[in-house]
Every structure is written in structure tokens, then in C-alpha cells.
Image: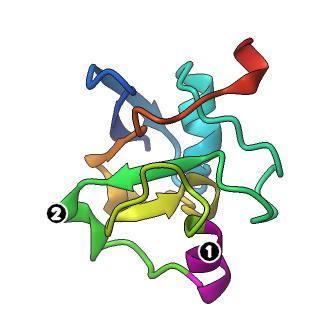
Amino acid sequence: MSITITFRDPHGNPVETTAAPGNNLLRVGQAAGLPLEGTCEGQMACSTCHVIVAAEWFDRLPPASEEEEDMLDFAAGARRTSRLSCQIDLTAEMDGLSVSVPAESNDLRRM
């Protein structure tokens, strides 16, 4: 089984991809070529994998931990529905998930 995820790149262009439940949103976004750096590799020591979850999806995801909320304070362009993509493990119930990569995102791996 695979689920569909729609990312919006920093320019607002849709990038639709599929993933298996159990995969991680950061890895899926990186595989789709999006500028999600993930410097700390999911250890919540940075905010370089920050995404903005579509409002209709935000409350359907497991809530962010206090540690994640603290890291989001450092995320460029953070909003009420911001999350760290490294902290979202995909489930079958997330089929159709929609997230945006903020315009302020920079992936230093690409420079």
C-alpha cells in the first residue's frame, strides 16, 4: 500500500509523491527533490526540515512534542500549523496529506 502526499515547493508549485506507511515525511520530501535539509537527521537539534501543514490536516496529525515546539521557535517563516517533517512518521490515515515548504527555506546541501 502507498499513500499520496502533496508538497508545495517554496514557489508554491505542487509536487505529488507517494510513500509507504512507516516512512518519514522528511525522507519522502528529500527524495522528491524538495529543499528540506534535515541537518540534524531527525534528532530535533535544528529546524531545517520545517514544513507548513495544510490547515485541514494539522489537527489530524499526532501533536508536536514540547521539544519539537521549542525547535519550531527557530524556524524561518513558522506559522500556527508548522511542524518538523522529521517528526512526522506516515500512516495509512495520512493518505492525501498536504504540506508546504516555506519560501524562506534554504538547503545548504545544494549550494
* Residue most extreme to the bottom: 66
Q: Is residue 23 above or below residue 34?
A: below
- At label 1, the amino acid type is Glu
Identity of the residue drawn at 29% across and 73% down: 60
Q: What residue is shown with label 1?
A: 68
How crowded pointer 2 is (Cα within 10 Å; few <14, some 14-19, many 20+) is rated as few
Q: CA distance from mark 1 to mark 2?
A: 20 Å
- SS assignment at label 2: helix
| Residue 50 placement, left or right of 107 | left
Q: Main secondary structure of the magenta part?
A: helix
Q: What residue is shown with label 2?
A: 56
**Magenta region:** 65-71
* Residue most extreme to the top: 111
- In front: 109, or 1? 109
- At label 2, the amino acid type is Glu
Identity of the residue drawn at 42% across and 50% down: 77
